[in-house]
């Protein structure tokens, strides 16, 4: 199967599509699943595909989700099958994710008479903008039949191709968009005493916010508060009336997220008030943390020893502070996200995800199919 899967991966890589516009990729998936003897359905009109593999024996239902969207980047890999769509590139490995699920779907469908239960296949668009999982859930992908557990696999350039990374508990962080606006009173830069300078207030506020991680979050808990945008004014000799900052908050627990929001609001409002200005915080939760279900990981560990060998299993010591909309599924049913090693001797293969020059070792496809297909069989037998 590997040559066929590599050809599919290259076709997807060469024709990347942005979030919620994955029509060509969805059509490719749809036609492949039909050739496997399945009855695929579009999740939305021509975007996203789902299908059910009904096992020959009664049992539970496990879902396996792969995302399909690319990123708004100009590819700089130099590959023969580089992106043909300017400003669009598979720099997060979603082409690998889709291909691995297609391979697992073919293996499982060929052996469905031996399955003790069902496998729900979910090829999802719109992961990069955190819309796809929520939309797929509202369309009922977890309901008919009810899904008991769900899996996903994500490329990881920190691990060599041929290996898989496992972790119990917190795997990836939640994501929240945060912004604050300081309103003072404008005036001439030469007469600051006649104004309330929102730029100065913002600077003090930004500094005070850094104390949240240092003094309000336990040292053993992980959290990130980063402001990447600060805007104010239009001229160097004018004190503006307002200043605005925009950033992100990442945490590994709902409680930590709640505490940070509470402290941010207090600091923004009270710091501004101390200068005679007003401060307003906007805190928008994008997605929750990815928390792996321990019993699922324990089964996958034993299964992985059989499918790819214990020497190719890696235990991840720390979670990633990146975020994934797979967390929306985990709010409904227990499951796990697995890391798929994609690095080799080429330096480009060890670049971070979302880099326009990153390469993914295609031998990882074989590892992914072996691990996930066997893992699903074992999960249906044991959970």
Image: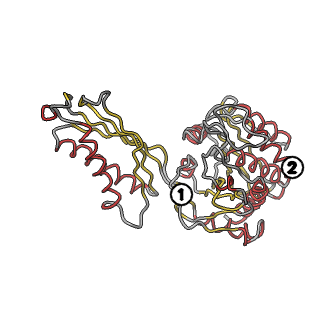
Q: Name the residue under label 1.
A: 320
- Report how far apart the C-alphas of labels 1 and 2 lie in the structure: 32 Å
Mark closest to the chain's N terminus, 1 or 2: 2
Q: Which colour assignment does the render follow?
A: secondary structure
Closer-to-camera residue (292/82):
82
Place of residue 117 in the rendered image (x, y in percent of width and height, measured from the top left): 74, 55
- Quadrant of the image occupied by residue 376: bottom right
Closer-to-camera residue (157/70):
157
Place of residue 264 in the rendered image (x, y in percent of width and height, measured from the top left): 31, 48
| Location of residue 366 with respect to 189 vertically, above or below | below
Residue extending farthest bottom? 311
170 lies left or right of 7: left
200 lies left or right of 138: left
377 lies left or right of 211: right
Circles 1, 2 touching at the beta carbon (< 8 Å): no
Q: Name the residue under label 2.
A: 3
The C terminus lies in which quarter of the figure? Answer: bottom right
Q: Residue at x 45, y 52 (%)?
A: 250
| Location of residue 232 with respect to 168 vertically, above or below | above
Secondary structure beneath dot 2 equals helix
Q: Which mark is residue 60?
A: none
Place of residue 158 in the rendered image (x, y in percent of width and height, measured from the top left): 63, 60
Residue extending farthest left? 193
Secondary structure beneath dot 1 equals loop
């Amino acid at each position: 199967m590997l040559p066929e899967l590599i050809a599919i991966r290259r076709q997807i890589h060469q024709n990347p599509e942005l979030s919620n516009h994955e029509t060509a990729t969805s059509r490719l998936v749809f036609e492949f699943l039909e050739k496997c003897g399945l009855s695929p359905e579009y999740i939305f009109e021509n975007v996203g595909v789902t299908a059910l593999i009904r096992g020959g024996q009664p049992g539970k239902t496990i879902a396996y989700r792969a995302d399909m969207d690319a990123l708004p980047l100009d590819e700089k890999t130099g590959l023969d099958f580089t992106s043909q769509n300017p400003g669009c590139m598979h720099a997060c490995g979603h082409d690998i994710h889709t291909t691995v699920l297609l391979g697992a779907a073919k293996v499982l469908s060929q052996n469905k008479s031996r399955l003790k239960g069902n496998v729900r296949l979910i090829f999802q668009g719109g992961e990069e903008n955190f819309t796809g999982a929520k939309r797929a859930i509202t369309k009922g992908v977890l309901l008919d039949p009810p899904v008991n557990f769900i899996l996903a696999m994500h490329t990881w350039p920190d691990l060599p191709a041929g290996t898989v990374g496992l972790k119990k508990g917190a795997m990836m962080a939640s994501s929240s968009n945060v912004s604050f606006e300081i309103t003072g009173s404008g005036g001439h830069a030469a007469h600051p005493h006649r104004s309330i300078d929102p730029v100065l207030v913002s600077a003090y506020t930004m500094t005070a916010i850094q104390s949240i991680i240092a003094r309000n979050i336990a040292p053993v808990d992980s959290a990130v508060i980063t402001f990447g945008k600060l805007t104010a004014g239009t001229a160097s000799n004018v004190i503006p009336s307002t200043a605005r900052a925009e950033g992100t908050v990442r945490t590994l627990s709902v409680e930590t997220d709640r505490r940070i929001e509470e402290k941010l609001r207090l600091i923004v409002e009270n710091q501004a008030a101390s200068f005679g200005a007003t401060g307003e915080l906007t805190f928008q939760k994008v997605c929750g943390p990815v928390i792996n279900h321990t019993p699922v990981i324990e089964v996958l560990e034993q299964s992985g020893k059989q499918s790819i060998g214990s020497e190719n299993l890696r235990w991840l010591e720390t979670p990633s502070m990146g975020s994934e909309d797979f967390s929306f599924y985990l709010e409904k049913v227990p499951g796990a996200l697995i890391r798929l090693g994609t690095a080799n001797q080429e330096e480009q293969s060890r670049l971070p995800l979302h880099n326009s020059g990153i390469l993914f070792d295609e031998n990882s496809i074989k590892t992914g199919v072996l691990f996930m297909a066997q893992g699903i069989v074992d999960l249906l037998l044991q959970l």
